[in-house]
Amino acid sequence: MSAQKADRALLEADHNPFADPVVRLDPGLALPPHVETLHAAARAELHRAVDGVASSGGAAMLLVVGEPGQGKTHELCRLRAELRSCQWIEVPPLKDAGAPFQHVLRYVAQGLLLGPHLFFWEALRQVARAVRDEARHAGDEATAERIDAALPHDPRFLQAFRTLVREDPALIDLLEKRGRTLPPLAGLDADVAKVLCRILDRDAEALALDWLRGAELPDDELFLLGVRRPLESEERCYEVLRALATLSVRPLLLCFDQLESTRGHLGDAGAAALFNALMDLYQHLHVCIVLMCQGEVWGELTNAKALPLAAMQRIRRLPDLGGPTAVEAARLVEARLLPLWSRTGARPPYASYPFSPPWIAALVNEVRPSVRQVLARCGEELDAMRAAGAIAERSGPAAARPPKKREVAAVLAEERAHKLRAAAERADLATPPLRQERLRNAIGHLLAGAAVSKRPIAGAHVRAVEVPPKPRSGQRAPMVASVALPQGEVRLALEVHSDQARGA
């Protein structure tokens, strides 16, 4: 009877417990099931190193290498959930070799904005305390009492500070003018002080946060913030990064997942640009940098000597992430099934039912699968059982399966679904500059592909495509495509630089 109830639970479940073996770095998603012994050495060293940065006041660059599906992103999820000593920031793969600081700043500002400890309000409270103490020292008790009335004594009541200070609009100018010469703002970029205090203004709060993220703002919005220019250069972006790191009460933990994607998009030159920027952050800021990369790609970068030597010498490589043992694989399967058993009250013959420990051990010994492959294989087997309407226990050896042939349409559909999921999970990916950059890249790849394949587009043949790189400042030059038409060859300039479609 125990097996029958478990069979019914598996067949009637809303979804396959192994349906999604890919881990995503989305704070809104529940943590995936975890096996403590799997990658325990790397995880322990990672936590010690990160906590060491927090206690020492120094900096560190840590590297974790593992093949696809071995759990690199999973370990970052665990680090985010368990870490308390640093401010966790996810930085996606770099897309523009000419703007690494702008890229990092965008996601640092975004991460601090979403942080549970209200980073910007905590920074403003530091400014308010400094101005109060300076006023009291100068004998200006009226100003000191005015600020004291808005400062809650309990750090949990930052929202109270936000409400009270907004009831006294003149306090915004007072904090800005007197606070910029005092710690923590003293010595930082002057515009950061202005923009930070404008967060107190209801009408300017959203603009202030957009400016800190490096968004392009028109002149009238810059005037409202009290600044003359946006963050149009790498030097400016670096200065704002330095200011945010200084204002943070906890050191920044910058997590770079999927370094292979940066190399895939930008090549060795792009990877070198990223690591040169990371070296600047490492040398001058109180930060911990965690890098996740596939072993093959890291070996290629190392062998090609593509990365700056100074960065290579300072990277501390932690134990590599290997595949699960037979026992660990069985525990992975059990962890995926346990919620179903608990929810339905089923008592299966064993926790990994219908996948017996001998079957899982045979799979591990014969195929040497990654963590993801173990879950995917169980998911495929269970899908087949659910489609047949009967659970068939897997108790014998698990034969290796030949790789399935995949149609081009299926691959494209999967990639499209992946992009849509990413856009839905990350609101910052929907900003106009990123949308424009993605559209520009898509048009460039489409035209370049047509030129290489010599296939016509609407009867026109693309001869060549010129895609100028993004400049360090100012507007990017348009793409130029040489197109052969029946009436002769023409050159078309294509621009992507506004929310409204426009051609030239």
Image (cartoon, helix red, strand yellow):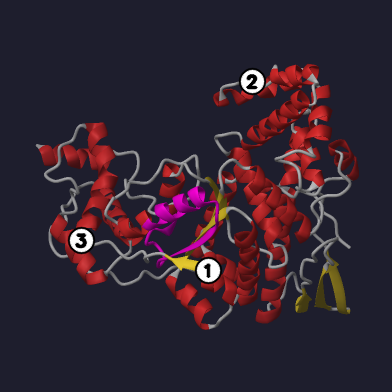
Q: Which disc is residue 445 wearing?
A: none
Q: Are marks 3 and 1 in contact (CB under 8 Å)?
A: no
Q: Are the two marked residues, 2 and 3, in contact with CB atoms closer than 8 angstroms?
A: no
Q: Which span is picked out in magenta?
A: 45-73
State the image coordinates of residue 328 (x, y, percent, origin top left).
24, 56
Residue ID for mark 3: 326
Q: Is residue 12 left or right of residue 392?
A: right
Mark 2 or 3, nearer chain start: 2
Q: Is residue 47 magenta?
A: yes
Which residue occupies 17% across, 65% down?
A: 362
Tell me: residue 393, above or below residue 463: above
Closer to the eye: label 2 or 3: 2
As drawn, the label of residue 314 is: 1
Residue type highlighted by circle 1:
Arg
Q: Residues within 10 Å of mark 2 (few under 14, many from 20)?
A: some
Answer left or right for 66 relative to 287. left
Crowd around label 1: few <14 · some 14–19 · many ≥20 (10 Å): few
Marks 2 and 3, Cα distance to the nearest angstrom?
A: 54 Å
On-image quarter of the N terminus: top left
Instruction: Residue under label 2, please give it.
Output: 160
What residue is at 53 percent from the left and 73 percent from the top? 312
The residue carrying pointer 3 sits among few (fewer than 14), some (14 to 19) or many (20 or more) residues within 10 Å by Cα, namely some
Q: Nearer the viewer, residue 95 or 358?
A: 95
Amino acid type indicated by mark 2: Ala
Residue extending furthest left?
A: 1
Q: Position of residue 259 (x, y in %)?
A: 53, 65
Residue at 68% from the left image edge and 62% from the top image edge: 100
What is the quadrant of the C terminus in the image? bottom right
